[in-house]
Image (cartoon, rainbow, N blue to C red):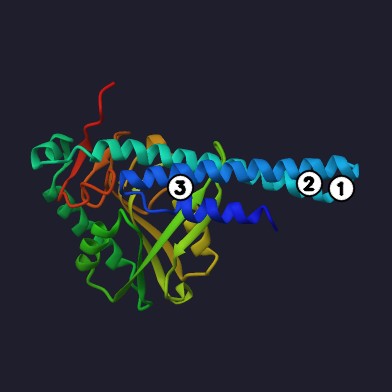
Amino acid sequence: MAYAVPAIILRVLVYDYPHQKSSDLVVRTFLFLYTSFIYAFLWLQWLILIFTLKINFINCEIIVDIMRIMQYNILYIAKVLQHTTICCTIQGETDMYKSTEEFNSKIKSVMITEEEIKEKIAQAAKEIDSWYDGTPILLVSILKGAFVFMADICRAVTVPCEIGFMCAKSYYSGTQSSGVVSITMDLDQDVSNYHVVIIEDIIDTGRTLNDVVKLLKGRNPKSLRIVTLLDKPARRVVELEADVTLFTIPDKFIIGYGLDCGEYFRNLPYIAEFREEEN
């Protein structure tokens, strides 16, 4: 249908368009405004058609469908605006890294040292080893933040195991605790043959991970557990607890050891607090 065309344009060109460069922000903003204009034009056409044909608003199912579509589009546009705002903010932060000194100036303080991480990983790996009962273990990492943690913990595990990677995007409305999960990269394995262990970098609100857990449980694994590097309980909006938590941290903006700000700082061997701009 006609209204599906701008929806596709909005998703592919506006939301999923690469956002590492300032020029991309300009393109995305233009495309968003253009697509919004198309939406407004289409809704106007629908209203004209409705009033011209004198359609009964109460009994006509097409009106209900249109309202649902409009509600979805409003929520999606709000998500795009939020995403664009975040990208613009991060772009402002990362444009300044013209030297190592400027880069390091954004590291406010080291919260967890490299040695502390290594010690906790060894303990977590022993816990994973204890879950082995002859059935293969599948370590699942949700990209991108957990890739460093996954690399270290899978080398510390001594029992037979495989690894798998997933990419997931979730869309929520307001304060709802669940939403629509879009899996942009899925596992190759049939999880029904494995003990699945999700290797997570940080549990924040828990919404995306909670929905991924539901999705994987629906595939009937032998068992499913969560091992998280960091837990930020102050931000939780769903009932979700990890089976193994290496560190519990306060509600601060953290970077390092796979965690980023605008794709920077993932390479730090420790976990640090990010120095945000002062107002």
Q: Which mark is residue 60?
A: 1
Could you tell me the amino acid type at mark 3? Answer: Leu
Q: Which residue is mark 3?
A: 240
Query: Label 2 near label 3: C-beta < 8 Å?
Result: no
Task: Tell me how far mark 1 sits from mark 3, CA to CA.
Answer: 42 Å
Is residue 224 shown left or right of residue 102? right
Type of the residue with mark 2? Val
As helix, strand or loop, the secondary structure at mark 2 comes to helix
Say whether marks 2 and 1 touch (CB < 8 Å).
yes
What is the quadrant of the C terminus in the image? top left
Indicate which disc residue 64 carries: 2
Q: Amino acid at mark 1?
A: Cys
**Residue 142: horizontal and vertical position, in percent?**
37, 59
Q: Is residue 235 above or below residue 260?
A: above
Q: Mark 2 Cα within 10 Å, few/some/many (few <14, many 20+)?
A: few
* CA distance separating discs 3 and 2: 35 Å
**Label 1: few (<14), some (14–19) or many (≥20) C-alpha neighbours in 10 Å:** few
Q: Secondary structure at mark 3?
A: loop
* CA–CA distance in space, label 2 to label 1: 7 Å
